Amino acid sequence: MKKTMPTMKDVAQEAGVALGTVSKVFNGIPVGESYRIKVEAAAKKLGYEVNQYARGLRAGTTSTIALILPHVDHPFFSTLAQYICEALLQRSYRMLLYVTAAQPEAERECLGMVRQNKVDGVIALTYNQLEVVEGLPFVSIDRCLGPDIPCVASDNYTGGRLAAEKLLELGCVHPAFLRVGSPNLSETDKRGDGFESLCRAKQVPYEMLRLDDGAEDILFHEFFRSHMEDGKLSIDGIFCSTDLLACRIRTMLENLGIRVPEDVQIIGFDGIRQFGTGSLYCSTIIQPVRKIAETCVDLLLAKNRSNIPALVCLPVSYASGGTTNG
Amino acid sequence: MKKTMPTMKDVAQEAGVALGTVSKVFNGIPVGESYRIKVEAAAKKLGYEVNQYARGLRAGTTSTIALILPHVDHPFFSTLAQYICEALLQRSYRMLLYVTAAQPEAERECLGMVRQNKVDGVIALTYNQLEVVEGLPFVSIDRCLGPDIPCVASDNYTGGRLAAEKLLELGCVHPAFLRVGSPNLSETDKRGDGFESLCRAKQVPYEMLRLDDGAEDILFHEFFRSHMEDGKLSIDGIFCSTDLLACRIRTMLENLGIRVPEDVQIIGFDGIRQFGTGSLYCSTIIQPVRKIAETCVDLLLAKNRSNIPALVCLPVSYASGGTTNG
DNA sequence: CCAGCCTTATGAAATGTTTCATATTAAAAA
DNA sequence: TTTTTAATATGAAACATTTCATAAGGCTGG
């Protein structure tokens, strides 16, 4: 904002054409060749840049979408944010980022701000069930918010089955599922369901431990101690609901003198490989993060909003990462 | 955007007051008690939300700032983004996020978009030296962009000295500095300088290895091999320019049969502790990320823009994390 | 009771676009 | 040459706000 930024009127004057003509040029609407050239020259000479606020006001469309996340300081969310941001920039959309710390009131407040900002759409991953602005293109990640809101998620159920299947295949006879955080009716809850379903089908004895946030460490210790006999853990395979948890559990067990993967094998969920090239932290069920991001953007920006699917489940895959025997 | 969103005019009519009065109420400008009540009641009844685009157009101020980062899919950047976002939301500012993949043209393009969007300010961490929009509040992270652009960074030089000091203190007699990426004139270059300066002062023989991006793994192997004698590494302490590199080097060495920290001690830089509670990955020099974020926001939003410092250096600290003997 | 003063509400103007009804121009047909 | 038609440039109006000059109202002091 030098002195005052040049406006379309200035460009029109400089080029000796009408205001509407300048507008057309900047919106890609066909215009006489000679006019286009004059306008472009004048615009460059004056250093004109279109004012998105005036455009947004008049046209009612802002080329801006909002991304609402619980955190961005978390490997899964940050990769998601990165890919979504890239996909949007590629399509000449800008991205407003809101972080909510997973708090209901913050999530609601975001929706208010979003309405004020007249965004063209919202992609949100919320921890709470909230009522969504009607009529505004909206895509939810990992949570079904309503019949008209498409939800994009990994195939968590199959992922859970896959984890159980792998553990059994690798020789486990007494697996367990561990998670922190109470069930919150999101798609991710299905990871445990899938695990349980497979163990039942195979008639294998299994454990399920879902802890509320809080004194998890103590409770985990208690859980492990209660499954110890003669210094040996009776559980020989653990499926953790996230990679972060898997890493914590691994450290915890190693501190107890239990070897991973010799004594107990661990599989996580997410598949974040942040520290690059070859250094995996745990065996895991990989979420197709890039695919999730692109699906969200495609759904949000879809021209035809009549036949949008209610739930898109994307395929997961298993990757060994040192906490299993394969 | 239901049918059409209610406007101030609608609110004014509903409340039986003038347009200007409604405006005042929503801008916190004092107004007669009875008026305020009428307006607020009418606004609530109609579900009115202020239109930020109209406001932005007329007032020329948008309560929006742009954050430009090379990536957000990286523990240091994502924590930074998180804290900056939080600080901004707390002050009722929104944040537009741009990721550039560290590419010069993308970084420049961002500045163009930023100008179009009439943001109230920019916080940027760029890998390239770029000419900045004049007259627009701007704060740079880790790089001095010009005399009028404040730069916020950790005290990288002291951090480098501290790392060297620690290694020597812990018994190393032949330390090395490793980094990937050619020097790019950013503040982070000073990490190596600090390391070197301390080694010189203490008259300790040391190695410096700065690699371009590319075939780093091969070159690192070559480097290590050239410092091996009878299967023993002559280097006994490594200061890596980042934690990510430290983790890679650790894995690499362990694969070569060299034990960490018994045979060689490693210190990284950044201090990201993403996998939560107590699980550190490497000994490190911790950057005060939250402090950096808040300093950026404070500087950017400072009322008095006359006496803004050119460079703010924030103190770092050492933390042991298992790759050193203390 | 009135003049003067201060406070506060009012609504027109301005912000920089897009859109659309109208005017202009050029080309084609008569 | 004149008329018709098609194509395209024009500029006023609209978008929802803020701002500011003006009007209205309420007090105070004479």
Image: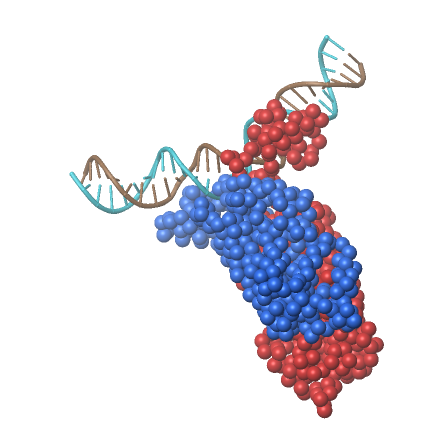
Chain colours: A blue, B red, C cyan, D brown
Q: Is residue B64 above or below residue B256?
A: above
* Residue B10 in view, yes or no: yes
Q: Residue furthest bottom?
A: B230
Image location of residue B259, percent across then percent down: 74, 80
* Residue B156 in view, yes or no: no
Q: Give me the residue at 74% from left, 86% from top.
A: B234
Q: Which image quadrant for residue A78?
A: bottom right
Choose between B194 and A210: the one closer to the eye.
Answer: A210
Q: Quadrant of the C terminus of chain B?
A: bottom right
Q: Is residue C30 above or below residue A153?
A: above
Q: Is residue B197 above or below residue D9?
A: below
Q: Residue furthest right?
A: B169
Image location of residue A170, percent across then percent down: 61, 72
Task: Give the number of callouts.
Answer: 0
Q: Is residue B247 left or right of residue A53?
A: right
Choose between D10 and A137: the one closer to the eye.
Answer: A137
Q: Give me the residue at 68% from left, 27% from top.
A: B37
Q: Residue furthest front?
A: A203
Q: Give me the residue at 37% from left, 48% from top.
A: A31
Image location of residue A128, percent across then percent down: 64, 47
Image location of residue A312, percent across then percent down: 51, 54
